[in-house]
Image (tube, rainbow, N blue to C red):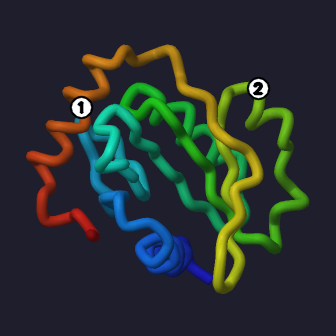
């Protein structure tokens, strides 16, 4: 299993489950790259960054912490076979959500907390810049 396969699997499942979510796949903004950004169409101020890792949750946590300057809610998504290695309290301490990817579905184990590094105006501006820079990356 590769990270790209995990991402594609998630997007495929997610597209079927919720029609009011726009998914932006692996794009950067000012040298930061996030595997997936999700935007809820009904609430422009509600968007998530998701980092996908097969097994290296520590690297995923590090990337999620860095992503906090770009998105208000961050998730780490891991392949289910390596869920037992994750330190849940470490993710919770930083307010990072956890998604476990199975072969045909995913499960949200931890709900992320909104980070305090961005105010509404800043992350709305970042979202608009991402949408303008990468309109071709919208999956749905």
Instruction: Determine the image quadrant of residue 134.
Output: bottom left
Work out whether 36 lies above or below 68. Answer: below
- Front residue of 72/65: it is 72
Q: Mark 2 = which residue? A: 93
Q: Is residue 84 left or right of residue 81?
A: right
Instruction: Determine the image quadrant of residue 124.
Output: top left
In the rendered image, residue 137, in percent from the top left (x then y), is placed at 21, 64
Q: Mark 1 = which residue? A: 126
Which residue shows up at 56% across the image and 60% down it? 52
- Front residue of 67/10: it is 10
Quarter of the image with the N terminus in it: bottom right
Residue that protrudes farthest toward the front in the picture: 42
Instruction: Determine the image quadrant of residue 63.
Output: top right
Distance in Å between CA atoms under marks 1 and 2: 25 Å
Secondary element under disc 1, as helix, strand or loop, is helix
In the rendered image, residue 98, in percent from the top left (x then y), is placed at 69, 50
In the rendered image, residue 35, in percent from the top left (x then y), is placed at 43, 57
Which residue shows up at 76% across the image and 32% down it? 92
Contact, mark 1 vs mark 2 (Cβ under 8 Å): no
Secondary element under disc 2, as helix, strand or loop, is helix
Quarter of the image with the C terminus in it: bottom left
Which residue shows up at 40% across the image and 18% down it? 118
Q: Residues within 10 Å of mark 2 (few under 14, many from 20)?
A: few
Task: Give the mark nearer the N terminus: 1 vs 2.
Answer: 2
Q: Residues within 10 Å of mark 1 (few under 14, many from 20)?
A: some
Work out whether 51 lies above or below 12. Answer: above
Which residue shows up at 41% across the image and 34% down it? 71
Work out whether 123 lies above or below 61. Answer: above
Return the mark for residue 9. none
């Amino acid at each position: 299993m590769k990270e790209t396969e995990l991402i594609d699997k998630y997007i495929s499942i997610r597209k079927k489950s919720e029609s009011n979510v726009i998914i932006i796949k692996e794009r950067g903004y000012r040298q930061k790259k996030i595997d997936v950004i999700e935007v809820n169409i009904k609430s422009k101020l509600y968007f998530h960054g998701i980092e996908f890792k097969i097994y290296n949750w520590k690297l995923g946590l590090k990337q999620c912490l860095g992503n906090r300057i770009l998105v208000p809610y961050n998730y780490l998504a891991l392949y289910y076979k390596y869920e037992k290695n994750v330190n849940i309290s470490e993710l919770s301490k930083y307010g990072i959500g956890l998604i476990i990817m199975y072969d045909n579905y995913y499960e949200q184990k931890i709900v992320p907390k909104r980070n305090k590094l961005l105010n509404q105006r800043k992350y709305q501006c970042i979202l608009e810049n991402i949408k303008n820079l990468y309109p071709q990356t919208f999956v749905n």
